[in-house]
Amino acid sequence: MDYSMLLKPEAVRVLSSASSKKRLLHEIANIGESAYGLDHDNVVEALLERESLGPTGVGNGVALPHARVDGLEEVVGALLLLEKPVEFEAVDRQPVDLAFGLFAPREAGVEHLKALALVSRTLRDPGVCAKLRANDDPATLHMIVTEAQAAQAA
């Protein structure tokens, strides 16, 4: 699993703000719809259902909302940088300004877990997060996560 398969450049966005956690999930669904042709309402419903099991805010300003959705053949993602952090019920109670949404096929097994592990490992790196937060160009953000994976593999 690598970012070239997981994250299209057009699935990376910078948001000036999201008024709430729910609004952020809608923004992630918007990317799922525009970049991958997913049904917006189904994605929002799946993300909210997953959040009801427990918040996906992992701490240090990072959230990893993820869900299984119809209409996919492979795991794909969406990266958002928020200029203004939003409350996300994270484990450390800190607001979130980096969100990486993952969409997996309904039948996805280990590939979903591999993608989640890859993203989690990348966004646990304080240096990667600092670089992401210091940039507001989607193409640069895409390059940062792609290069981070190459550095981790070396």
Image (spheres, rainbow, N blue to C red):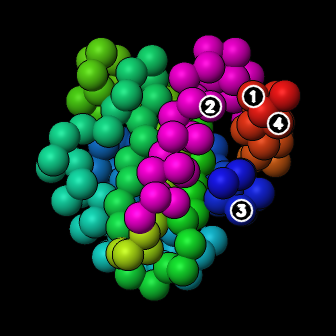
Main SS category, magenta section: helix
Residue with the mark numbered 1 = 152
Q: Residues within 10 Å of mark 2 (few under 14, many from 20)?
A: some
Residue with the mark numbered 4 = 150
* Amino acid of disc 3: Met
Residues marked 4 and 1 touching at CB (< 8 Å): yes
Residue with the mark numbered 2 = 122
Q: Residues within 10 Å of mark 1 (few under 14, many from 20)?
A: few
The CA span between labels 3 and 1 is 17 Å
Q: Residues within 10 Å of mark 4 (few under 14, many from 20)?
A: few
Which is closer to the viewer, label 1 or label 2?
A: 1
* Amino acid of disc 4: Ala
The CA span between labels 3 and 2 is 15 Å
* Quarter of the figure with the N terminus: bottom right
Q: Quadrant of residue 37?
A: bottom right
Q: Secondary structure at mark 1?
A: helix
Q: The magenta stretch spans which residues? A: 109-136
The CA span between labels 4 and 2 is 10 Å
* Amino acid of disc 1: Gln
Which is closer to the viewer, label 3 or label 1?
A: 1
Q: Nearer the viewer, residue 82 or 62?
A: 62
* Amino acid of disc 2: Thr
Residues marked 1 and 2 touching at CB (< 8 Å): yes
The CA span between labels 3 and 4 is 14 Å
